[in-house]
Amino acid sequence: MKNFTSVKDVQNINALVEKALSLKANPFQTKLAEGKRIGLIFFNPSLRTRLSSQVAAQNLGAQAVVLDIGKDGWALEFEDGVVMNGDKAEHIKEAAAVMGRYFDVLGVRTFPELKSKEADYSEKLLNAFIKYAGVPIVSLESGTRHPLQSLADLVTINEQWTATRKPKVVLTWAPHVKALPQAVPNSFAEWMGKADVDFSIANPEGYDLAEEFRQGVPVFHDQAEALKDADFVYVKNWSSYDDYGQILSQDESWTFGSKQLELTENAKVMHCLPVRRGLVIKDEILDGPNAIHLEQAENRVYAAQAVFYELLM
Amino acid sequence: MKNFTSVKDVQNINALVEKALSLKANPFQTKLAEGKRIGLIFFNPSLRTRLSSQVAAQNLGAQAVVLDIGKDGWALEFEDGVVMNGDKAEHIKEAAAVMGRYFDVLGVRTFPELKSKEADYSEKLLNAFIKYAGVPIVSLESGTRHPLQSLADLVTINEQWTATRKPKVVLTWAPHVKALPQAVPNSFAEWMGKADVDFSIANPEGYDLAEEFRQGVPVFHDQAEALKDADFVYVKNWSSYDDYGQILSQDESWTFGSKQLELTENAKVMHCLPVRRGLVIKDEILDGPNAIHLEQAENRVYAAQAVFYELLM
Amino acid sequence: MKNFTSVKDVQNINALVEKALSLKANPFQTKLAEGKRIGLIFFNPSLRTRLSSQVAAQNLGAQAVVLDIGKDGWALEFEDGVVMNGDKAEHIKEAAAVMGRYFDVLGVRTFPELKSKEADYSEKLLNAFIKYAGVPIVSLESGTRHPLQSLADLVTINEQWTATRKPKVVLTWAPHVKALPQAVPNSFAEWMGKADVDFSIANPEGYDLAEEFRQGVPVFHDQAEALKDADFVYVKNWSSYDDYGQILSQDESWTFGSKQLELTENAKVMHCLPVRRGLVIKDEILDGPNAIHLEQAENRVYAAQAVFYELLM
């Protein structure tokens, strides 16, 4: 594995899941990363990703150094051949290369602006780090994907599923008051496409994910139909991809509650957090026995630890 | 000890003071906390508490991770059963539970707003962490108490006092230009009430602390009368509890200087810092041999280290 | 070495350079600093200095704790004998002394305001830390000097230079759109004055550095004349010292490109970063084989590590 920015970077996802579960069982089994340095660069705020990555790095014995860069704190130039006489203080060529000199692995967090599909989906910042840093890059969430979350999600599904048949996994849209990125659902869909599960997606019309992420996946615009016999339901809001970054619906009939749960095979209910109670998922679910959102959050540590392990060893 | 948010959480305060002094004599005597993780969550800025807690955790070999949360950075919902369609992005139930999954001990820093006595004294945030985190909670100062400061204060008194008789300890109010919390004086009073000292309080009328903190303690509204024969004087401003959060007096005759010191038994003079020179305590005292404010600051490390030790071992 | 704020603090600069190169060859050769604590206090933002100092401290096995203090975050009083009833919350006497109680070495970063020559060149903040902290102080860049940068620069020159004759080193001004401090050029000039090199400076009229930094150094106002036969060219903008903090020229004929390089002895080209491409140095140089700016950045780690080593051992 050279970088970790998408499921495509992973040669063997089952082995990576097993590694994460093994690290969860024994987090300090290896201190082989002593003397290794992991830089965690946040261009956008983060809570779970930040804490779980730091803990993961420290569990391995690696040095983790966090750098918070405010939106206006480090104005980077990305164009080649320009005279930098405006407000950009440093070119990405130097910024990424210097970080690469200080660290053995670099984690980078960036968000989409949800204004231009082309800008967000070009992943300019992440790709520039890959091009210029000279060391492995880990996405700590980018404009289009959140692979550490997806790996933790898959780890959680494996951990919870004990039957021999394939589990049925459904990703369902839910309403929200703010326009949210597609990174988590894109990434979850991409990972489920490679995992040993039956996967489908439910969302209102206008909310279909970009084709590259849902190819071959059944997409339902009727939530009830999709939820039938589900073993795992991943509830998540996202803004429209087609009508880019827009909120087309706030239909609370999609809010996940007991009514939805009853349609499933007593499914485990997942969310990446933060979750707005009552709006995305009802209290009756989050406070009940089917919710596994805290297990997902906990598994973020071991997902990150497995990825750092693979990149550093 | 299950949590450390007040002196009431401590079974044996003498043993805790001895532990702190023992750790000061030999800070690295135990690395038993290796592999343990301490999360330090600051909802309000901090200098001494932040640094001393980090050093304390690292002295024990524990992993310390600091999370700074700006006032508007993480809008938490505290009400049950609401539909979260406003500006609150996460419910305390998830926020605290996730932190609890990442750390073995959580330190939490929060300040009072000094607008509503009921709101501040309900300690909503601290109590929610206790309720939902599932791991021991350490107050890094809350709306009503600052127990790590008080423990460091008691450690300092023990360290300085070599006579066999009980020392006389006086907490005296002093003027200030800003409305300050009652957390430090409340907490100091509460700890002195359990310590082997003669304790009294001096403050202008209208500045009596809440009854729960001063019960059984002589309160003087005449500073000179209170200071007579004092061995230790703790000087500190606070805003009114009765006329909640208000500044009722800026009477500089209460500023602690040589005139006040002469009334005492050559008392040691204490302050939790930051101290406004000339206004709260005069330079003649702070630059003289009676001041022990820097010793108090230094002992913050060993107070925190003793508390983390007790909670982790 | 008692402090590290200028080349004058260093008894033997060759030994310090050798130590840095030895640490670069084997960063973990010594963990003698285990149990030692380094505080890194940033009154101004920092990227390279912050990361390289943290990595350096951790390489030595020391505990590094970073404290970011926003410009308005910690209003310090510097005057003696005042009544602090304004907006200053803490006196430098306590602030520095407390930091000194928590750490074995303190790094301090501060910037000039470029409004008053007297204020900036008095180094009030840095000198107060030296006076009151009671532990060794390391400048992480101050109003007038950036000695960790200069040490890294000298390490880089030593690393690159293999001939037996003395190298010719030229510091040349280049244009910029913002008024920048003189700290880097001052400091570089001061270090080159003690190093085994032939050193000269090129800058437009009005840009001569303060005399204390350039005494005995040939200063050219004609860039071409200065660059002749140079083996190393350090390109850097600074604002005027005489017309304090002003931008007197933005003459792009001073921008360093191939035309300038041709005048030299195939010189290595240096910059402390961040560098504005096209304005300070042209892409043709930064992307070519003569640029060693990334080596300088990398050597920041080992410069800091050598300094911490000397102060802690």
Image (tube, coloured by chain):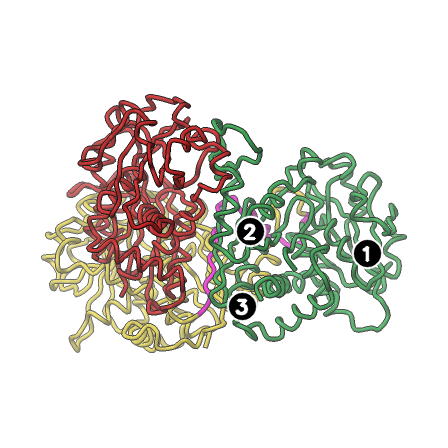
Chain colours: A yellow, B red, C green
The amino acid sitting under disc 1 is: Val
Q: Quadrant of residue A213?
A: bottom left
Residue A139 at x, y percent in the picture: 43, 61
The residue mark sitting in front, 1 or 3, is 3
Sequence-wise, the earlier of marks 1 and 3 is: 3
Q: Which residue does the image show at 31% across and 36% down from the upper left?
A: B170
Reading the image, the residue beneath label 3 is C60
Residue at the image point whose x is 23% and y is 26% from the top: B242
Of marks 2 and 1, the one in the foreground: 2
Q: The disc labelled 3 sits on which kind of residue?
A: Leu
**Where does label 2 land, which residue?**
C134
What chain letter is assigned to the residue under label 3?
C
Q: Quadrant of the N terminus of chain B?
A: bottom left
The answer to which of marks 2 and 1 sits earlier in the sequence is 2
Q: Which chain's residue wears label 2?
A: C
**What range of the chain is rendered magenta?**
A62-83
Residue C91, above or below C170:
above
Q: Is residue A175 visible?
A: no
